[in-house]
């Protein structure tokens, strides 16, 4: 039996940011905490959000590239100190995930770890949250998940319906001019979401159709390549933000081994590794691993990507990575064979691997990491 549900209210188009005051008023938020990062302050995007709010807002701009429990609790302290009554999360997946965790912990007297994994039934009231994405990648603005590096160093997933923002404001204007490398990395994050969601064995045909549509937008019609080549291509920016949102709508049915591996690599000490770049590099190896389990879904993915019916999906992704300027291996990012035992240990326990279409054993992860390191 399939259980189907969708998801949150999303205002989507150029100029959607002007809906922010109405969204806050509808949620009863009069004194929001803005969760963001310093890069968005320096880029002038924070100023645009503050101007759109048009009233008092408290800013937490110390979100790390991979959000941590320590940063979450710092933001919660500021939220409580300033008597905030809601959150506006502004940025890519990291600030939005941090904002979600703040919304949870601002109303909780339990430790963050109490909500790790699938937390359905464990979560009570959370603070109201509006998400404003500034990249076209994670889709965190419409997803049930949070990714946080907790105090003991593990990068954990938290899943509950309550973590979906109350309102998402997707304004592609905020992504115009995004640098090519970040456009490529976040775009491949969206692509990986679409592919892994389609391949997940969970039965949810509407979600699968949404994933295929997102994949067609990003690759089949060439909007990812266009957005990387020209940061001012407004049509490409619109479609890439839609593909990112669709990717997260699709992965309500689960992800797979790519994400189990990228979550593991993303927590490596001494390296600052972008989640989307990791997904892009790892994806071809997992596509080869899953080929015999993919069945007819590989054909539908090829069609959505605009490939020939007998095309090698993994090779096509490798060529796309090369075309948009992403690295060919984890080794090029500083990941070494000596990291493999630690990487495998965390990947085997990651919840994303549970919905990979082919079961992944410890020795499989070992081989996949060795292949991806190169």
Image (spheres, helix red, strand yellow):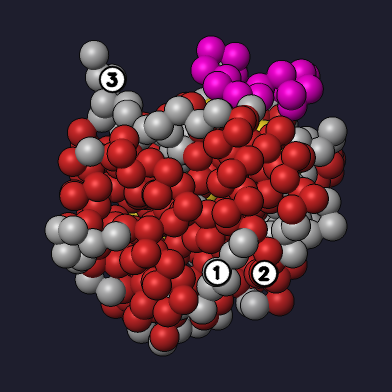
Q: Residues within 10 Å of mark 1 (few under 14, many from 20)?
A: many
Q: Nearer the viewer, residue 92 or 320?
A: 320
Q: Position of residue 327 (x, y in %)?
A: 57, 71
Classify mark 3: helix, strand or loop: loop
Q: Nearer the viewer, residue 26 or 292?
A: 292
Give coordinates of residue 282: x percent, y percent.
53, 54
Residue at the location (53% across, 12% down)?
Answer: 121
Residue 115 on the magenta segment? yes
- N-terminal-most mark, 3 or 1: 3
Chain part drawn in magenta: 108-123
Quarter of the figure with residue 304:
bottom left
- Mark with earlier residue (2, 3): 3
CA–CA distance between discs 2 and 3? 42 Å
Q: Nearer the viewer, mark 3 or mark 1?
A: 1
On screen, 95 above or below 253? Answer: below
Is residue 146 among the parts visible in the rendering?
Answer: no
Question: Which residue corresponds to mark 3?
Answer: 3
- Check disc 2 and report the residue beneath it: 332
Residue 265 location, x and y as percent? 68, 49
* Residue identified by numbered label 1: 328
Tell me the SS state at disc 2: helix
User: Horizontal and vertical percent for residue 142?
Assistant: 43, 43
Residue 253 in view: yes
Of the 4 image quadrants, the one containing the C terminus is bottom right
Q: Which quadrant holds the N terminus?
A: top left
Q: Is residue 17 left or right of residue 203?
A: right
- Residue at 18%, 49% (x, y): give it: 300
């Amino acid at each position: 039996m399939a259980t189907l549900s969708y998801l949150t209210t999303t205002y989507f188009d150029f100029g959607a940011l002007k809906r922010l005051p109405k969204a806050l008023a509808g949620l009863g938020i009069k004194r929001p905490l803005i969760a963001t990062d310093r890069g968005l302050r320096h880029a002038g995007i924070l100023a645009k959000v503050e101007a759109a709010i048009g009233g008092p807002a408290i800013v937490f701009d110390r979100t790390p590239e991979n959000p941590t429990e320590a940063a979450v609790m710092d933001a919660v302290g500021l939220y409580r100190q300033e008597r905030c009554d809601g959150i506006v999360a502004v940025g890519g997946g990291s600030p939005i995930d941090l904002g979600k965790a703040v919304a949870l912990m601002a109303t909780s007297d339990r430790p963050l770890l109490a909500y790790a994994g699938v937390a359905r039934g464990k979560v009570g009231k959370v603070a109201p949250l509006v998400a404003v994405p500034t990249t076209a990648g994670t889709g965190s603005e419409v997803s049930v998940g949070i990714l946080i590096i907790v105090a003991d160093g593990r990068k954990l997933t938290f899943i509950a319906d309550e973590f979906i923002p109350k309102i998402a404001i997707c304004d592609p204007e905020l992504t115009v001019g995004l640098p090519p490398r970040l456009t490529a990395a976040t775009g491949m994050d969206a692509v990986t979401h679409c592919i892994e969601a389609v391949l997940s064995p969970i039965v949810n045909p509407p979600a699968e159709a949404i994933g295929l549509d997102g994949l067609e937008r990003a690759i089949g019609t060439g909007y990812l390549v266009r957005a990387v080549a020209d940061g001012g291509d407004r049509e490409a920016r619109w479609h890439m933000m839609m593909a990112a949102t669709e990717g997260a709508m699709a992965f309500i049915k689960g992800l797979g081994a790519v994400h189990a591996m990228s979550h593991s690599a993303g927590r490596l000490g001494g390296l600052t590794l972008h989640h989307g770049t990791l997904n892009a590099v790892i994806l071809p190896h997992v596509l080869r691993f899953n080929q015999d389990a993919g069945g007819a879904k590989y054909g539908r993915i090829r069609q959505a990507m605009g490939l020939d019916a007998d095309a090698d999906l993994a090779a096509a992704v490798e060529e796309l990575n090369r075309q948009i300027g992403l690295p060919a291996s984890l080794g090029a990012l500083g990941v070494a064979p000596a990291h493999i035992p630690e990487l495998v240990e965390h990947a085997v326990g990651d919840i994303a691997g549970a919905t990979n279409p082919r079961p992944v054993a410890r020795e499989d992860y070992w081989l996949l990491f060795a292949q991806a390191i190169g």
